[in-house]
Image (cartoon, rainbow, N blue to C red):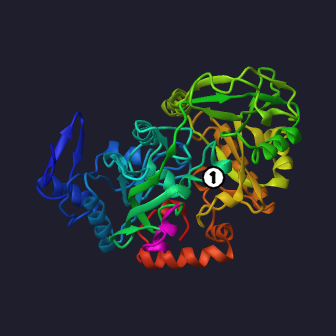
Amino acid sequence: MRHTRRSFVKGAAASVLLVGGSGTRRAASATGLVGVPSLDGELLVDDTARREAATDFGRAVQRSPVAVLKPRSVADIARIVAYANTRGLKLAMRGRGHSLSGQAQAEGGIVIDSSMLSAVRWQEGDTLDAEPGAMWGDVAKTALARGRTPPVMPDAMMLSVGGMLSVGGTGETSYRSGAQVDHVLELDVVTGAGQLMTCSPERNGELFRMTLAGLGQCGIVVRARLRVVPAPRHVTIHTLTYDDVDGFLSDQERLATAEGLDLLAGSVTKDADGRWRLALLPGSFMAQPDEATGRPEWLTGLRSKAEAAPARMSYWDYLDRRRKSIVAGIASGRPNPSLAMVLPQGSTGPFLSHVLTTSEAAIGIWRIETFPMMTSRFTQPLHKISTGPIAFTLRLQRRASAQGAPDHEAMLAANRTLVTQMRAIGGKIYPPYAPIPSRAEWQEHYGPDIWPRFSAAKKRFDPNNVLTPGAGIF
């Protein structure tokens, strides 16, 4: 049933579509929203919808919007962006709310919930089209039905396509294949001025480049055409353990250029006795479960102290392996003050050692993930990584006891200190999982070559600065 020009009640909460009628007049009077255009979807002002849009997975920042749009068409998004321009309202597109510092929030503005636009459609020529609210798990299933897969997949299948493409998107194949934004062929974008534009490297190229990993500053992705490649049917994961950080990282550097390797990641966790356990997790793709049972050549000469029996699983089970733990973490309601960054190759070892040996820096960390990255494979200008042939992504996964609790505040303070230290050695934050930088820090982040382009694109495509205020860039 499509609701237009009426208010309606679901359960005990009233959800008002601001188009007309007495209920609308009362809501408009309370919210200041008047003259809202006719919509195919719903514009909600009830407390439940606004409260949900006012927080995210980090649970550190709460900014309440005046309304939440649940669009049922691309036209809805274009209409509400045009409306925001006339009313001086801020807008933010929200996928699965997985950012940590309020990046997808809009205080006193309108949050667009992308979940209603979730279609995935197969296209010719090993491509598929995905709407912004589509989950990567649905993208994978559509591709796997034809024996294909995106070259880079996240470790959380419930993340949205629009959300990941707005930040970059990396995974365990990124060491060779770059980010998810490096495999986008075409976009449909609603700009900050309310125009629907199709863009690609050859068509409206600057909008294309300033939208991918652009943190929603120039436009809202409403369709992405993604490249897919032949998919494996099975995966073998090896687990190698280490006593020292140097051997742990140097073997990752070596494997980043090894032949015959398909997946590469490292993991640092605490044993029951409180000691850090370092494990390298390289993997291979297979067409059959019993394929390549011999020891891979790339394992020879590594510096690990021990090696577990390899684990074999289907490709889908590999992709979806963390669903239960991620869903449980979200359901717990506990804050997730995590931090992700990219560090220069030579600085990663000392930085990681500092975190592991400094109680203030390590507070609340239950896992650290490490990923070596061949920097030449990252081609989109707004997805910033450190210089040098190889850089390392570090994800410091923390969990606090409760919002605003002393341990939560201590973890946020630790992140701020580590970001300062990281910048001093040439590192770059991964924006969705980091504290919000100042405007001067954003300029430093993008650098003297990219910042002027980004700033010019913002003025061109979002001249009234209505889009995505939570990032704090402009």
Q: Is residue 261 above or below residue 440?
A: above
Please report the residue visible at 43 percent of the width from the left and 58 percent of the height from the top. 106
Where does the image place residue 71, in percent across and percent down from the top left?
28, 53
- Residue 298 appears in the rendering: yes
- Residue 340 appears in the rendering: no
Quarter location, residue 48? top left
Residue farthest along the left direction in this orientation: 21
* Residue 356 covered by magenta stretch: no
* Residue 207 covered by magenta stretch: yes
Q: In this rendering, would 14 be left or right of 427? A: left
Please report the residue visible at 61 percent of the width from the left and 70 percent of the height from the top. 439
Highlighted range, magenta: 201-212
* Callout 1 amino acid: Ala
Where does the image place residue 114, in percent across and percent down from the top left?
36, 50
Quarter location, residue 93? bottom left
Where does the image place residue 407, in percent across and percent down from the top left?
67, 37
Out of 83 and 238, give the one closest to the viewer.
238
* Image label count: 1
**Where is mark 1, residue-wise?**
434
Quadrant containing the N terminus is top left
Please report the residue visible at 64 percent of the width from the left and 40 percent of the height from the top. 408
